[in-house]
């Protein structure tokens, strides 16, 4: 089957087609990871690049996001393993001022699928909200996502507030503009570039 159709459907924001091709691909035995990493994320990257160059506009981003979410809804249950043990509890959210949630939700699904208990706070999350939830839930890890250069800076405020609150919790960060050096500079315990790496990082932080 032609998997490039999935890339095209996400890129062009065609929800029905994205959903149909995803079903066909699964029936043909293609793994969810292959579909996500090799076709769907690439479609989102391309629409982002076109947006950056002024070739498409916010409504196009929204339509691509809708198509991506439609496909991910089908794949998410398949990312969940049969794990009966809980490796640890993670509070995850996109930081204040930022409404991007596709990557964060992918990270949340992968963590859940690999045995973590995940409390997904959603988007636009303040330091107080992270702290309150982590404290009440006795979380092991706070996981933050930011997609904007203007919101990634708020991660430091959250980390400082968490440390000042005296919480014994590890903090991991990620999102397109974030990198290892930035993560270190704001005092995070770890950075990961994608959902798979986030699982490995969370496992290593739990052991540390
Ligand atoms: Co926006 N947007 N957007 N957007 N958007 C970007 C981020 C942008 C890079 C596009 C561009 O110009 N090329 C740009 C940011 C520029 C910058 O800051 N330097 C941008 C902009 C400017 C904006 C607005 C300001 C546009 C406007 O209104 N004028 C606005 C801001 C709104 C706000 O948040 N306050 C805006 C709005 C939107 C939509 C709402 C239309 C929509 C989001 C819909 C949604 O999420 N529900 C949207 C979209 C879709 C994008 C792009 C095209 C795609 C993002 C995405 O979903 N990628 C994006 C361009 C791009 O990233 N190439 C763009 C797919 C997803 C699977 O990847 O989220 O990177 P990603 O997640 C990855 C990794 O980053 C990592 O793992 C994931 C899986 O591999 N990861 C983590 C993420 N979080 C992690 C946490 C971890 C670990 C790993 O913790 C440890």
Image: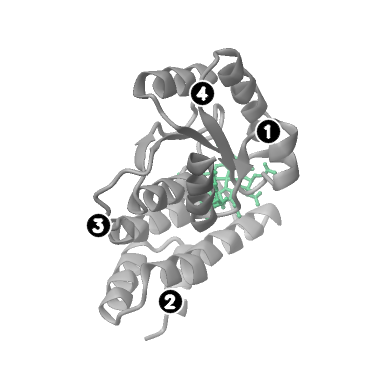
Mark 3 vs mark 2, foreground winner is 3
Q: Quadrant of the C terminus?
A: top right
Report the Cα–Cα distance between label 4 and label 1.
Answer: 28 Å
Q: Residue furthest bottom?
A: 1
**Who's the residue at 47% across and 45% down the image?**
104
Badge 1 marks a residue whose secondary structure is helix
Please give the residue where the numbered disc 3 appears in the rendered image.
82
Find out whether the residues at labels 4 and 1 contact each other: C-beta distance under 8 Å: no
Earlier-in-chain disc, 4 versus 1: 1
Badge 4 marks a residue whose secondary structure is loop
The spot of residue 152 in percent (x, y) is 65, 34
Find out whether the residues at labels 3 and 2 contact each other: C-beta distance under 8 Å: no
Q: How is the image coloured?
A: one colour
Q: Residues within 10 Å of mark 3 (few under 14, many from 20)?
A: few
Earlier-in-chain disc, 1 versus 3: 3
Report the Cα–Cα distance between label 3 and label 2.
Answer: 31 Å
Which of the labelled discs sits on residue 168, or is there none?
4
Is residue 56 visible to us here? yes
Report the Cα–Cα distance between label 1 and label 3.
Answer: 39 Å
Which of the labelled discs sits on residue 150, or is there none?
1
Badge 2 marks a residue whose secondary structure is helix
Q: Residue furthest top?
A: 165
Earlier-in-chain disc, 4 versus 2: 2
Badge 3 marks a residue whose secondary structure is loop
Q: Quadrant of residue 30?
A: bottom left
Which of the labelled discs sits on residue 5, or is there none?
2
Earlier-in-chain disc, 1 versus 2: 2
Q: Along the horizontal axis of the image, is 29 left or right of 206?
A: left
Mark 1 vs mark 3, foreground winner is 3
**Who's the residue at 71% across and 31% down the image?**
186
Report the Cα–Cα distance between label 4 and label 2.
Answer: 47 Å
């Amino acid at each position: 089957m032609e998997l490039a159709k999935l890339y095209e459907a996400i890129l062009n924001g065609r929800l029905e087609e994205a959903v149909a091709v995803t079903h066909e691909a699964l029936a043909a035995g293609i793994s969810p990871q292959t579909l996500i990493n090799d076709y769907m994320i690439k479609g989102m990257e391309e629409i982002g690049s076109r947006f950056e160059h002024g070739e498409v506009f916010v409504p196009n981003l929204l339509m691509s996001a809708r198509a991506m979410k439609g496909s991910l809804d089908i794949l998410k249950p398949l990312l969940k393993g049969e794990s009966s043990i809980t490796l640890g509890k993670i509070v995850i959210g996109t930081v204040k001022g930022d409404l991007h949630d596709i990557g964060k939700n992918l990270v949340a699904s992968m963590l859940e699928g690999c045995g973590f208990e995940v409390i997904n706070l959603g988007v636009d999350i303040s330091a107080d909200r992270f702290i309150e939830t982590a404290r009440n839930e006795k979380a092991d890890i706070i996981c933050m996502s930011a997609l904007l250069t203007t919101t990634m800076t708020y991660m430091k405020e959250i980390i400082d507030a968490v440390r000042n609150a005296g919480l014994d919790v590890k903090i991991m960060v990620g999102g397109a503009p974030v990198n290892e050096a930035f993560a270190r500079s704001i005092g995070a315990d770890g950075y990961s570039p994608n959902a798979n790496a986030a699982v490995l990082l969370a496992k290593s932080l739990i052991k540390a």
